[in-house]
Amino acid sequence: MSKDLQNIADKLEKEGHKTLDFFAGIEEAQWPAVVYSDDQDWTVHHLLAHFVEVEESIPRLIRSILDGGSGVSEDFDIDRHNQKHTPQMAENSRQFLLEEFKRLRRETVELVNGMQESDLELEGRHPFLEVTAIKEMLKLMYIHLNMHMRDIKRVLRGS
């Protein structure tokens, strides 16, 4: 395995553990805290559901690009997608979501471990990044979660 692939796999694994530890440290009374309130209120629980949904959908997107696909359609609306799928995923229990995130992150790491160096440069349309390399999609998977966890911390601190 190349150094780049190994670094990405290691980072995804490390950040996955960090994410699970982060949610394990949230007190019961903090879970209903509203983190975002645009069209819909997103609580801490909703963000965990969002993490699971992303962990399911982005590797699926990457697999389709590896199989020769072009990625999401040009008219894909990420906000509409999130407004539909996050509340659906949030209907699941916290325990289910935590276990599902753990399972899906393990599968994401396995996906990376099975890739070739050249796969990292394959391009496709990402819902947020637009046309970009698989390498960037994988990096965004942990950057994205860290940004949301930062926002959760701010809300829970009362900032």
Image (cartoon, grey):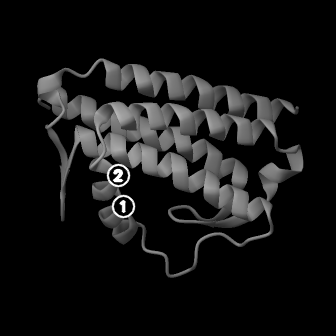
Query: 154 or 80: nearer the eye?
Result: 80
Image location of residue 86, percent across then percent down: 33, 55
Q: Which mark is residue 89?
A: 2
Kindly check if marks 1 and 2 are in contact, taking CB atoms under 8 A apart as contact.
yes
> Of the residues shown, which amino acid type is indicated by label 2?
Met
Residue at 67% x, 61% y: name it.
Answer: 132
Image location of residue 103, percent across then percent down: 55, 34
Q: Quadrant of residue 97?
A: top left
Q: Which mark is residue 138?
A: none
> Of the residues shown, which amino acid type is indicated by label 1?
His
Residue at 27% x, 46% y: name it.
Answer: 46
Q: Which mark is residue 85?
A: 1
- Give the spatial CA distance, label 1 vs label 2: 6 Å
Q: What quarter of the picture does the C terminus occupy?
A: top left
Q: Secondary structure at mark 1?
A: helix
> In the drawing, does residue 40 fall left or right of residue 113?
left
